[in-house]
Amino acid sequence: MANDVAGLDVRDTIHDVVGEYMLSTYSEEITSLAEAKLTLLRGSSVRLYRAEKSGVSVLAAVPASRETSGALTQLRYEYDIRAELKLGFALRPVRFITHDDSPAMLLQDPCGEMLSNLLDVTMPVHQVLNLAVGISLALASAHARNLVHGGLTPGSIMIHPGRRRAWLTGFRSLTIDARNVSAVDGSVSHLGPDLLHYIAPEATGRVNRPVDCRTDLYSLGCVLYLLLTGRVPFPGLAPAEEIHAHIARWPPEHMEPSGAVAQRLVAILFRLMAKEPEERYQLAADVVADLLTCDAKGGSNGSSTRILHAKSLLGTSDVLLGRDGELESLRKAVHEASIGESARMIPLEGPAGIGKTALIQHLRKQLREVPHEFAMGKCEQAEGATPYASLTRALRYWQRGILGCPPHEFKLIQTRIKDALADDASIISAVFPSFTPLLGVFEHCRAVSIHAERPRFLKAMVKLFGALATRGRPLIMVLDDLQWVDEGTLEVLAYAMRHSSNRCVLFLGAIRSGEMQLGNAWGLAFPNDDCLRRLSLTSLPQDDVKRLLKSLLAGDIAGIDDLAASVHARTGGNPLFVIQLLRSLIDENVVDYDDAAREWRANLTEVADKRR
């Protein structure tokens, strides 16, 4: 089976690259679905079509009704995270177009089939096993990018029936984030029937537990239950009863597994569906490893299973190495903002791959019990000329966070912002249309000249930040890839930091080294540098590279000191380069797992010769 897996890797990589190329060429030309042949692949609140034209196909996600605002919000969210969605594990959004006077989102089409369309016939166990491996691999890839799906159902999974491939769509959560509990607020009316059949206890809003990657694993268990039994775990129940069943009951065992493979598969299924997240699998990669051992041919395949397990873990280490001082500085800055002594920007500077974004993610985890508002956006190079593009993305992130608030809390936030903005609410809605549901519909009256309009907008932004950030609950706004920030966003940030009403706001940014120069836009926005507190991230020393290797490779590692020295010499201590090199070394069997010795071993000569 090891050769089969390797063959799949090569074929799938070629398939993904070709798909990316074909669609990037085709999607730039398509502006309408009018002349395309449409085939319905999935119903529900967001219909999914395959659109074929000139021998090439794309997918089109279209809200079923113009009044379905939640469906459109989901599509916009998925489009916002498109940079993280790769064709190897997800249906990647490409662009929005208009179809029948409604927005529609185009996605890349790997030419698979929706799992929801294959449920009419009983599947043999080996087919269920192949599907389970493919879906688990896709989830492992998503989780490695800190993405929680948040709504896994058969209607959100496209599969390749003949191979262990699956692609996910319909993402409802942005990151592994305690605040962003997908779109679930605990109200039964808010949960669609499709989602209710597969929802984890902590995602119902009735259990005081955060949503994380293990939430997806519970939903995976429910999907496997359906594939093995032909029915959902708790059929025929009213919505409130079904939610209670997911929290408190085990599904009936409508299964009579025959054979070792089926029995092992059922055991995996029930571990996935454990009520407490701690009792489930902790990583999708662990599910993959156990599923591979279910294969009748897997008895002598421990090495390839271990290698695949390790490759799935690479890049997901929860250890932050060599950044204790920087992390403490950020925690101190958050505290200062919470007591009204901040109003500053902290740019995290360093080369690509040095760990700027990882540092922010670890800060976020440490703040889970600290009251705060959080907004995050990624600056896109292609949007540098679009005014306020980066700021728009960050504010949308904050808005998604408050969607899960209880109604009374949402009302308090809404009232506070409206009162703060007063007549300036119209200009905020005009520049950021996504605020319309929060602020209401206004007919914005423009100022007499553009010169008068601009100061009014800047003052309105100061009011908005002041409403979002309060003493004891600061606003932390993060902008990634600040080297590509648009000038409009930069102007807003510089203006806001000079006003005392925004002293409970902390701006964090990740920016590549050498981008903050006096002669560029940064120099114009911050001529005195007095509002900036710059943090520079440097490469990891050899001891930290050793710790990183040990955290990435589960188990004992022979000659770990020599391996760490060679890897450090080849990568310069850049964490991303370490991970990439380790992937390559495992692929080429330079680093391999010795089953007899139960340890990892490396050919140090080949490691030293390996170029970055």
Image (cartoon, grey):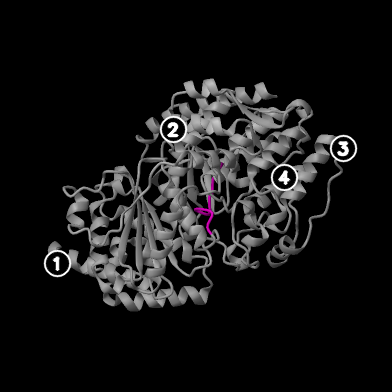
Q: Residues within 10 Å of mark 3 (few under 14, many from 20)?
A: few
The circle drawn on residue 359 is none
Going from N to C along the chain, the mark reached first, 4 or 1, is 4
The circle drawn on residue 258 is 3
Going from N to C along the chain, the mark reached first, 2 or 4, is 4
Q: Residue at x 64, y 52 (%)?
A: 214
Q: What SS does tag 1 mark?
A: helix
- Residue underneath mark 2: 571
- Residue underneath mark 1: 452
- In the rendered structure, are the residues bearing label 1 and label 2 in contact, judged by CB atoms less than 8 Å apart? no
Mark 2 → mark 4, Cα distance in angstroms: 42 Å
Is residue 52 shown to the viewer in this render? no
Going from N to C along the chain, the mark reached first, 3 or 2, is 3
Residue 24 horizontal/vertical position (percent): 39, 33
Going from N to C along the chain, the mark reached first, 1 or 3, is 3
Quarter of the image containing the C terminus? top left
Going from N to C along the chain, the mark reached first, 1 or 2, is 1
Quarter of the image containing the N terminus? top right
- Residue underneath mark 4: 224
- In the rendered structure, are the residues bearing label 3 and label 2 in contact, judged by CB atoms less than 8 Å apart? no
Mark 2 residue type: Thr
Mark 4 → mark 1, Cα distance in angstroms: 60 Å
Mark 3 → mark 4, Cα distance in angstroms: 16 Å
- Residue extent of the magenta highlight: 168-177
Mark 1 residue type: Ala
- Residue 216 magenta-highlighted: no
Mark 4 residue type: Leu
